[in-house]
Image (cartoon, rainbow, N blue to C red):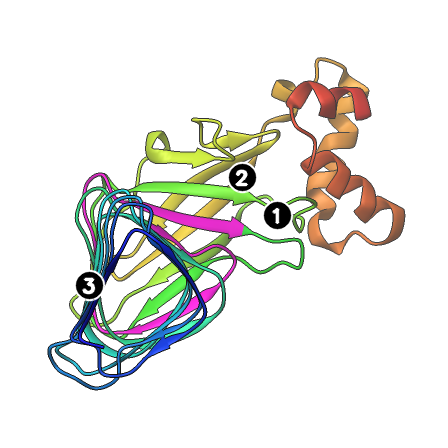
């Protein structure tokens, strides 16, 4: 099975020492791909192609190309040289692999709610996007590299808030990238943060910004000022009390906090208060 160039659909798993597997046009694999141990093996998803499953590699010379317009949904395992990312990489489960992730300026590295460990380097350049989801159970997307993580200040961050996501305390920090020695991770401006496809770094009463110490990047969550939420002084007082209680709230109070934070707009929050 030295090569498979196809615009068709494969429903099932593909394995063996593949010299090359390329998905072109609307080519789709709904299943797992195992490239075996051949040093010459490469996997390429071209524009319009997609793979839904796990991609397993077995040699440090192997390469995984996700070209612009292509999508990979699943997980990566084993050992390879690099994931060359110009398209969309959607991680759907926690995972770990040996190799590098190299963004090209059009890549979309979507961690979703997962935790990823890359035993190698991570490079995100101007125009690349890092996707993170905050889940209902309190989990959030994050990635750790044992090698250097180099992240441009012009990288974009796409934040998704899952339905009924867990309460995010005012002033809380969420580390989304942890790099190894030699990392150079820049803080990313609020103008490059997009929450729930709003085109803004804010959603309802939440405001997102970043903090970097050079080898890690965290999301800082703050809440809107009470005066921005309501002109009613009593409502402002209730809102401030909710923020002060924070994660210590229980029972109906905690439910009300979550209702406030899951509201679609500040005007909805004002009405609830």
Q: Earlier in the sequence, mark 2 or mark 1?
A: 1
Image quarter where the N terminus lies is bottom left
The mark total stands at 3
Could you say which disc has been placed on residue 222 in the image?
2
Query: Alpha-carbon distance for marks 2 and 1?
Result: 9 Å
Q: Secondary structure at mark 2?
A: strand
The residue nearer to you, when weighing 145 against 189, is: 145
Residue at point 38%, 45% (across, down): 210
Left or right: 27 in relation to 38? right
Instruction: Give the magenta range.
Output: 109-133
Q: Residues within 10 Å of mark 3 (few under 14, many from 20)?
A: many
Name the mark nearer the viewer: 2 or 3.
Answer: 3
Query: Where does the image place residue 44, in percent across and percent down from the top left?
Result: 22, 60
The residue nearer to you, when weighing 164 against 75, is: 75
Left or right: 51 in relation to 152? right
Query: Is residue 239 visible to the viewer in this orientation of the structure?
Result: yes
Could you say which disc has been placed on residue 168 in the image?
1
Can you tell which quarter of the image residue 273 is in?
A: top right
Examine the structure image and report whether residue 125 is included in the region drawn in magenta.
Answer: yes
Q: Residues within 10 Å of mark 2 (few under 14, many from 20)?
A: some
The residue nearer to you, when weighing 82 against 126, is: 82
Name the mark nearer the viewer: 2 or 1.
Answer: 1
Query: Where does the image place residue 79, in percent across and percent down from the top left?
Result: 25, 80
Q: Earlier in the sequence, mark 3 or mark 1?
A: 1
Query: Alpha-carbon distance for marks 3 and 1?
Result: 28 Å
Q: Secondary structure at mark 3?
A: loop
**Above-or-below relation of 93 to 190:** below
Kindly give the residue lying farthest to the top in the view shown: 231
**Above-or-below relation of 240 to 93:** above
Could you say which disc has been placed on residue 188 in the image?
none
Residue at point 12%, 82% (across, down): 39
Could you say which disc has been placed on residue 183 in the image?
3
């Amino acid at each position: 099975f030295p090569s498979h160039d196809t615009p068709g659909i494969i429903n099932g798993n593909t394995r063996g020492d593949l010299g090359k597997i390329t998905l072109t046009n609307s080519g789709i694999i709904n299943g797992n791909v195992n490239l075996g141990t051949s040093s010459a093996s490469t996997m390429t998803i071209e524009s319009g192609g997609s793979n839904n499953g796990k991609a397993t590699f077995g040699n440090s010379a192997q390469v995984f190309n996700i070209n612009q317009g292509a999508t990979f949904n699943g997980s990566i395992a084993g050992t390879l040289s690099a994931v060359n990312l110009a398209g969309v990489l959607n991680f759907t489960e926690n995972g770990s692999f040996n190799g590098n992730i190299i963004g090209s300026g059009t890549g979309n590295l979507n961690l979703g709610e997962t935790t990823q460990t890359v035993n190698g380097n991570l490079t995100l350049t101007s125009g690349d996007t890092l996707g993170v989801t905050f889940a209902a159970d309190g989990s959030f997307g994050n990635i750790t590299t044992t090698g250097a993580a180099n992240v441009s200040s012009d990288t974009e961050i796409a934040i998704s808030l899952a339905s009924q996501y867990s309460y995010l305390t005012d002033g809380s920090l969420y580390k989304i990238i942890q790099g190894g020695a030699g990392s150079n991770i820049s803080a990313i401006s609020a103008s490059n943060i997009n929450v729930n496809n709003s085109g803004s770094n804010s959603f309802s009463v939440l405001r997102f910004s970043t903090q970097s110490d050079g080898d890690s990047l965290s999301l800082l969550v703050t809440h809107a000022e009470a005066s921005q939420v309501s002109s009613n002084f009593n409502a402002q007082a209730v809102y401030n009390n909710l923020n002060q209680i924070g994660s210590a709230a229980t029972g109906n109070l905690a439910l009300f906090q979550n209702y406030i934070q899951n509201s679609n707009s500040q005007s909805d929050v004002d009405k609830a208060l």
